[in-house]
Image (spheres, rainbow, N blue to C red):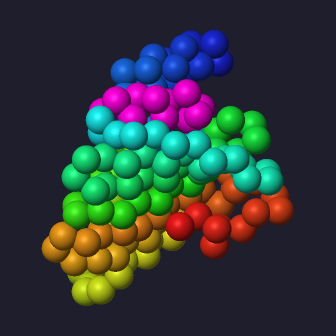
Amino acid sequence: MPIALVVVFWWVWLGAGPAWAMLGLPEDSVLTDQQALQAQRRTITHDGYGVEYLEAADGTVVREYVSPAGLVFGLAWQGPTVPDLAQLLGAYFPEYQDALHASGPHRGPWRVQTDDLVVELRGHMGAFSGRAYVPSFVPPPLTPEMIQ
């Protein structure tokens, strides 16, 4: 398959994807998230990255971490429910599912880590939080610990 056809297929597939800003996609996708959540949006710029805060009426807060290159490199959330991880993780969701199933059943906080993705979930009914990031996308000198 010619490389141009692969690139076109990839862009069409992403364009038809879910409404959430997804890991590795441009910052422009945050606006779609804001509309889907019917959320208030606030942007804070830090030295070396930005954070898009989306706060929905139900109390859910999603923070999307954006690199200087304009790509979402990390996500964090808290609220009464777990957001749709298929939407948040986008193309990384199948990798997350595979790693989660391979880890087997357990109780307490979940941590799924692969070479390309880290997802952490914790909480209980009515109070959930978590984060997800692609380690190779975290811009230096930042560290994954600042994604919270």
Question: What is the x, y in percent for residue 81?
Answer: 22, 61
* Residue shown at the point (52%, 20%) measured from the top left: 11
Asked if residue 131 is among those painted magenta in the image, a careful observer would answer no
Query: Is 40 or 9 nearer to us in this picture?
Result: 40
* Residue shown at the point (30%, 86%) measured from the top left: 108
The answer to whether 125 is drawn above or below residue 40 in the figure is: below
- Disc tally is 0
In which quadrant of the rendered view does residue 104 lie?
bottom left
Query: Is 139 or 38 nearer to us in this picture?
Result: 38
Question: What is the x, y in percent for residue 88?
Answer: 40, 46
* Residue shown at the point (63%, 48%) measured from the top left: 44
Where, quadrant-wise, is the N terminus in this rendering? Answer: top right
Q: In the displayed orientation, state which residue is furthest to the right.
A: 141
Query: Is 133 or 103 nearer to us in this picture?
Result: 133
Question: What is the x, y in percent for residue 68?
Answer: 76, 41
Asked if residue 26 is among those painted magenta in the image, a careful observer would answer yes
Answer yes or no: is residue 87 visible: yes
Residues in magenta, as a range? 25-36
Q: Is residue 88 left or right of residue 72?
A: left
Answer yes or no: is residue 2 visible: no
* Residue shown at the point (65%, 60%) measured from the top left: 135
Q: Is residue 65 left or right of residue 104?
A: right
The answer to whether 110 is drawn above or below residue 5 in the figure is: below
Name the chief secondary structure element in magenta: helix
The answer to whether 42 is drawn above or below residue 30 in the figure is: below
Question: What is the x, y in percent for residue 58?
Answer: 22, 52
Q: In the displayed orientation, state which residue is furthest to the bottom.
A: 107
Query: Is 81 or 44 nearer to us in this picture?
Result: 44
